[in-house]
Amino acid sequence: MAATPASVTEQSSGPDLENEGLLDTSVLSELAKKDLVDALNSVNGAKTLVLDPSIASPLGLVTEVSLLKHHGVDKMFWLEPGPLSATSTNIVYLCRPSIRHVKIIADHVKRHAKESAKHTYTLLLVPRTSILVERILEEEGVLGEVNISSYNLQFIPIARDVISLEYDNAFKEIWADGDESAIYESAQALLTLRKIYGPFPRIIGKGDHAAVYRALLPSSNVSPRVAALAGGDKIDSLIILDRRVDMVTPLLTQLTYEGLIDEMIGIKNSHIEVPVSLLSPPNPTPANPAAPSTSASTSAVTAVPLSKEKKKKYHLTAANDPLFGELRDMNFASVGKRLNRTAHRLDEDYKARLKAQTVTQLRDFVGKLGGLQTEHQALRLHTGLSEMIVPQTRTEIFNKSLEIQQNLLASYDVSGQISSIEDLIAQGADMQLVIRLLCLASITSGGIKTKPLENLKREILQSYGYNFLPLLLSLSAPPLAVLLPNPLPASTPPSVVASRYPYTSVRKSLRLLMEDTDALDEVENDIGYVYSGYAPISIRLVQCVAQKGGVLSNPALDKEKSADSGSGNGNASSKVQAHPIVGWKGFEDVLAAIPGETFDIFPKDYAGHEDATSPATSLLQARNQTSTTVVFFLGGCTYTEIAALRWVSRQNKGRNFLIATTGIISGNSLVDSVAGIVRGSTGSKDAGL
């Protein structure tokens, strides 16, 4: 099949820096853009750019088509099998170092040689060169024809407080394949972060693979300390969490707005596929002189079934959609009320035009009209997205799966939940959902009884296909080992026995289940609101370091009680000064029970003395200074975990969180990754950057 022309979407506006003390992550975008420009400029003259589709969307977050054209790119194609018709002499390939990609490139070179077409080939590997690539090109007999270089694409800002490597297969490579490339790339990206924003005075973490911190320790060949390019010495610590430390959370169904969009529709590199009608601009001047009814305009969107409309890729970001910024972290049960309030407010604002009596009043309304139209468009979009999600949340399978999850989290009637999972298979539930629930049952109960487990595996293969046998084997074998029998066979490797998760004790020690869940859907009064009663283990571990009181009790409810009793500040909404970082102090027993290495170190700076000479130094932190704690998830994090960590940040003053991750994941994406199921960037072949 012939190569398909690629297209590029325009980049959105830069990150919102309205909150005091936030690090300017746009520096990372500028760095990625500069490195790309340098790589393109290394090839003189006009050039044809051939893109790996998996890189297109991440690249679109840091650059735009006009920049590529300005630096000599006259045509762009997807990297895919088949002939490549390039009009320019220079052909530049930009791709990840996979065997499939390299063989396609070798085929292009051979085809051009047969056609006597003369081209100069440059291969830019992301994020670094690979010996494997050279060997494959050598075996194909084209190594001498291709100039191999690299484009070091590292952290990409995907939100004001979130940066990601957009490394989709990091989890699978580390824990299913035993490939530690993602760990190396993570270490290099963290080193770049340290170079830009200053050193990490303290590095704290949990998990065997989280020991990526060793690469961050100064060595004799490190150059003298350079001044930070942005942000100064505002980072107080780096917290590294190995995904295996908390496998429970990503297996659960996300219940925040952004999380459910990812679960139901799918978010890929901050982009979603949206029905075209939801992106069409609203009509600012209705036929009648009365102000337009927002409810009427949104009902018009649903006249044609949204699921049957043509889809278009849309960049889902709060940078140019403030309404999304308000909705993204809310429990989905509260989204409808917020949309309704927004609709009524817009309706009142439009009606203000009728009350304008003077030229000045009319001028003021016209000045606000552009903002009203933008809000109106955002309201249409999110009302439409909600209407697409709601029917799926009302299905019997969806609600049954939530019930199973809640019961497993409470360790209630595990045998009954296993039977319910079996019923879901009979009802035709998605394979991913069944696997998620099965793994959740195994982790939370220390394994599943052998006979029911074998019966379930047999039913999965018979219902969904024997091609999923490798998936079941990967989930049951080390290093992943999340689907285990109980009791374990005598032949079980010691590493698997040691990796069994002590969920029951952790649930109690870290207060994972909320006692009062009546208002969790409506009021964000604990991080448990993101799962309607369950607090993510990963965020509880962050709280152990940065908000210890939040693990022991509910800080939001404590403030409410203080306000009711008239003590303290008497203000339930007031923030509490963040306490200094003092490591795992007070939670040593919990950390010892969770499998994986635990560490808390003070790196020495390049001059030979410690950045933080002792734990007591951090206690002297200025009360009026805002610092940033970097939280890095090795193996990916969910949108719901991000929402929970933002809640922690909102409770305190004096500390912001910069969330760094190898990529954004969900339970479905983890299962697909281990199963080897590859989904398109957003389902569209010509989606572009």
Image (spheres, grey):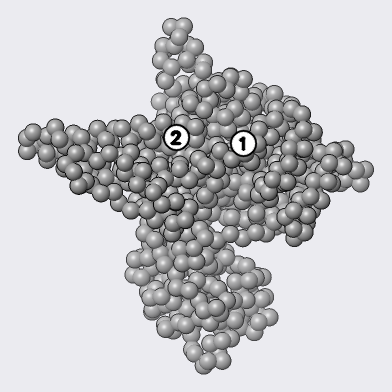
Horizontal arrangement in the rendering, residue 501 relative to residue 547 (left or right): right
- Label 1 SS: helix
426 sits left or right of 6 in the view? right
Q: Residue at x 49, y 35 (%)?
A: 332
The residue that disc 1 covers is: 399
Please say whether residue 579 is visible from this viewpoint: no
- Residue situated in front as seen by the camera: 533 or 305: 305
Name the disc covering residue 335, or none.
Answer: 2
Establish if 427 lies above or below 311.
above
Amino acid type at circle 1 is: Asn
How many circles with numbers are drawn on the protein? Answer: 2
The one of 123 and 31 positioned closer to us in this rendering? 123
Point 29% across, 45% down: residue: 374
The label number, if any, that marks residue 621 in the structure image = none
Of the residues shown, which amino acid type is indicated by label 2? Val
Q: Is residue 77 left or right of residue 248?
A: left
